Amino acid sequence: MSLLEDTLSKQKNPDVRNIVQQQFCGEYAYVTVCNQCGRESKLLSKFYELELNIQGHKQLTDCISEFLKEEKLEGDNRYFCENCQSKQNATRKIRLLSLPCTLNLQLMRFVFDRQTGHKKKLNTYIGFSEILDMEPYVEHKGGGYVYELSAVLIHRGVSAYSGHYIAHVKDPQSGEWYKFNDEDIEKMEGKKLQLGIEEDLAEPSKSQTRKPKCGKGTHCSRNAYMLVYRLQTQEKPSTTVQVPAFLQELVDRDNSKFEEWCIEMAEMRKQSVDKGKAKHEEVKELYQRLPAGAEPYEFVSLEWLQKWLDESTPTKPIDNHACLCSHDKLHPDKISIMKRISEYAADIFYSRYGGGPRLTVKALCKECVVERCRVLRLKNQLNEDYKTVNNLLKATVKGNDGFWVGKSSLRSWRQLALEQLDEQDGDADQSNGKMNGNTLNKDESKEERKEEEEELNFNEDILCPHGELCISENERRLVSKEAWSKLQQYFPRAPEFPSYKECCSQCKILEREGEENEALHKMIANEQKTSLPNLFQDKNRPCLSNWPEDTDVLYIVSQFFVEEWRKFVRKPTRCSPVSSVGNSALLCPHGGLMFTFASMTKEDSKLIALIWPSEWQTIQKLFVVDHVIKITRSEVGDVNPSETQYTSEPKLCPECREGLLCQQQRDLREYTQATIYVHKVVDNKKVMKDSAPELNVSSSETEEDKEEAKPDGEKDPDFNQSNGGTKRQKISHQNYIAYQKQVIRRSMRHRKVRGEKALLVSANQTLKELKIQIMHAFSVAPFDQNLSIDGKILSDDCATLGTLGVIPESVILLKADEPIADYAAMDDVMQVCMPEEGFKGTGLLGH
C-alpha cells in the first residue's frame, strides 16, 4: 500500500476521497491467457502509483515497457486454467485501462542485497523527458494521454539508510519551478528544472559513472526516486478554482497564523537590529580607549572582553574571581588570561555591566610572586643536582661508607622532588581553602590526603612491613655519602639505612619459615602422587556403566576435590595443600544422596569421581573425610542368572532430587546472554561459508584458562559441611547448585567446528529476533532460513527460544533456500528491522 492509499483509507470525508480518486487513481488489469485453450482471464486493480524497476535500464520509457512486458508462466510456475481444469503454460501481462490526471511513477532505487543482508541504493542514471506520451501503453487508444512533468523527488546520498530528501515542484499556473529543501523554499530561474548539486553523491568514488548528455526537454538523474506527471490539457488552466469550504477555512487559518508569525519575526528582527547598532556604537566608542598607556590601568578577564566584542550574545557582569590567589589578589599564573586596559575604559565597563572585584595596578600579589621565584630557583638547582647525583651513582661504593636506597626511588627521585616543589607552590592557595576562586569541599580534600598518604615516599620502597630494611637486595642499591647528602636535601624525612645496618630479623624468620613450608609442600605432594598415581594421571578408572568384575564396592568423591588435589600436586609451591574430602556438596540438607545410579552413568558423571577400594583406604589416611559415599553391587534372587542390584550409601533423597531437577529445568529456560551454535548445512553437510561480520558472536576463549573465584569465606579448596544433626531441615539447594555450576561450566563446554558460528541469545528472545541475528551472521534472509534442533523444525516466529526448547550450548541447524529475485519482499523485511524516515522538514515521506 502506497502512502497515498494509506492516507486515503483514513480519510472520513467522502468529498475529499472522491476528489483524490479522480485526480490520482488509475486502473489496470492482470491478463492471463492459457496457451492450451486460449482462455483469457482478467483481474482488475486500481493503482495510485506505478512501481518501475530501473535495473538494467537507462530511460524511463524502457522501465515502463518492462512493467507492461508479457511474462511466461511455465514449469513450476504454470497457471491453473479453470477451462482445462489443469495447470497449463500461459502468458501474463499488465494492461493499462485508464490513467489518472496525476500520474505518480515510483523508481525502485532501493533494493535488498542478499550478499550483505542489507538494503542498498541503485545510483544509476535514468533519463526522463518533460513531456511523456502514454498513448502507446494504454489499451484504449485516442484518449489523449499526454503528460507534462510536474514534480521530481530526490534522495541525495549513496546509502539506503541515510541521506537527504529534496522535492522539485512546478507551479501549474505560472510554470515556474520551486525547490523544497526542508523549511527552505527556493524559486528557480528561467522557469526550468535545474537539478544541479542534487546530482552529486555525498561520498564520491573513483568508479562513478559519467552523467550522460541530455537533449532539450530531457533530464538525467541518479537520485530521483519519484516522478510526478500531470495530464496536459489544450486550454489554459483557469485562474479561478472552486475550493471546498472546509479546505478554504483551513487555508485561511494557516495564512492568519503565518501573518502573525511574520509580524512577530519583523518586530524581533527590529529589536535585534537596534541592539546591534547600540552595541556597535559602544564598541566603536571604547575600542580606541581600551589600550593602557602611561595612564593608570586595570586588569580584566580576556574571556569577558571576547564575549563583550561578540554581539551575538548578551554581555554578563565582569567576574574576576577565577584569577584571584589565596590572598584575594591577582595570581601571577593568571596574568596570561588577563588583559590590561585603561582606567577610563574600566570605569565605563563596571558602571554599565557591574561585577568585580576590580584589579588595579597594585592588585598583583607580591607574596605569590616571591614564592614563585623561589620555586623556580629550586627547580633550576634541581636540574644541576640531578646531573651531579647521576655522576656520583656511577662510582663504586666500597666498604661500609654508603647508604641503602631503593632502586625505584632512584629512578623517580627527580619527579618526586618536582612534585614536592609543586605542592609547596600550591600550599599557599590551599591553606585558605581556595583554588581558582572556589571553596574546596572538605570531603574532597580528605580523600586527596588519603591518596597522598597511600603513595610511597622516597626510600620507603625498601621498608619491610615492620618498618625495617627489607631483606631483598634486588630492590635496593648502595650509594655514596655524597649522593645521599644531595638526596637528603630534597627528602629530609626519608628513612636512612647505612650500609652496615642489618636487615629485619622478623622478615628473615618469615623467609626461613616460607622456604621450610615450600619444602614441606613438595614432600607432601610427592608422597600423595606416589600413593595415588592412577588417580593423579587419570588412568585405570572404574566406570559404573561397565562395572569391574573384581570388586563389589566403589567409593565416590566430588570431581571438584580431585581437580583441586591435582592442581596442588602439579604446583605445590603455588597452591595450598588439600586437607579434606568435602563430600557434603554431593548430599542434600537431609544427608541423602542427590544422584541416582542412572544419572551417575550419564549427565552427572562429570560431577563425581569413582575410587577403587584400595585407593579409598589411602585417601582416608591422607585426608579428612566428612562423609563416606559408596555404591555396592549385589546379586538378588535365586534364578540363574541372578539379577544385579546397585545400592548407594547414603540412600537417594527423592524429594531433594526432584527439586534439583526442577531447578535445573528452570535455569535452562530462564537464561540470559547464553551461547548457542548455528551450523549452516547444504545437502545435510556442514560447510564453511564466507559471510558478513557476525553480530553478538561469543569469543572462542577456552574456559580452562580462566581461574574460577572461590566463594567468600572458603579457605580450603574443599567444601567442608556438617549435617548438624538428624533433624529434618528446610530444603535448600543453593549451595549445591552453585557448586554444580562451577563443575558443569567446563565439562559441558562445546567445541566449535568449522562452518559453525556462536551467537549470544536469551530465553525470552523470539525466534524472529534470532533469525535477524542469523541473517547478519550468515547473510541469509529470514524468509530463506529453515531452522531445526534435534530434528524438530523451528517455525513459530513469535515463540520464545525458551518455549521452543533452545537451551544454552544448543546446536541449531540452518538450511538456506535458494535466493529469488523478490526485492519487494526483501524490502518489507528490512523495513521491519530498520524503519527509515523521509522528509522531516516538509512532511514528505521517502520510499
Image (cartoon, rainbow, N blue to C red):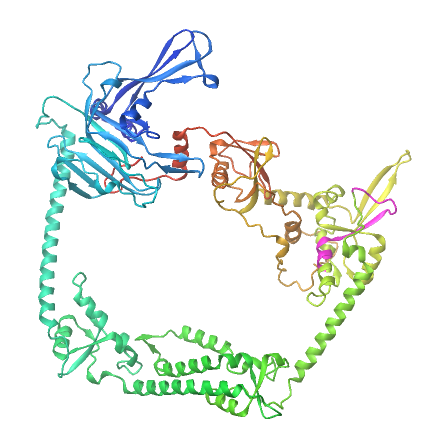
Please identify the quadrant where the N terminus is shown: top left
Question: Foreground: 159 or 457?
Answer: 159
Quadrant in which residue 584 is drawn:
bottom right
**Residue 30: horizontal and vertical position, in percent?**
34, 17
Residue 505 vs 309, above or below: the answer is below
Q: Is residue 627 visible?
A: no
Q: Residue at x 65, y 51 (%)?
A: 746
Q: Is residue 123 left or right of residue 596?
A: left
Q: Quadrant of residue 525?
A: bottom right
Q: Position of residue 291 (x, y in %)?
A: 14, 76
Q: In the displayed structure, would residue 45 be above or below residue 3?
A: above
Question: Residue 239 at x, y = what percent?
Answer: 8, 28
Q: How many tags in the picture? A: 0
| Residue at image location 88% in from the left, 40% down from the top | 635
Image position of 433 with respect to 204: above or below: below
Q: Where is residue 814 drawn, in percent x and y?
A: 55, 35
Q: Report the front residue among 217 and 660.
A: 217
Q: Which portion, as a residue range, is magenta?
A: 545-564
Answer whether residue 468 is magenta in the image.
no
Q: Residue at x 71, y 56 (%)?
A: 563
Choose between 604 and 407: the one closer to the eye: 407
Q: Quadrant of the rendered structure where residue 152 is?
A: top left
Asked whether the viewer can see residue 40, the reply is yes
Of the 4 image quadrants, the one containing the C terminus is top left
554 inside magenta stretch: yes
Left or right of 447, for residue 431: left
> Is residue 185 rendered to the left or right of residue 337?
left
Side (left or right) of 737 relative to 339 = right
| Residue at image location 85% in from the left, 39% down from the top | 644
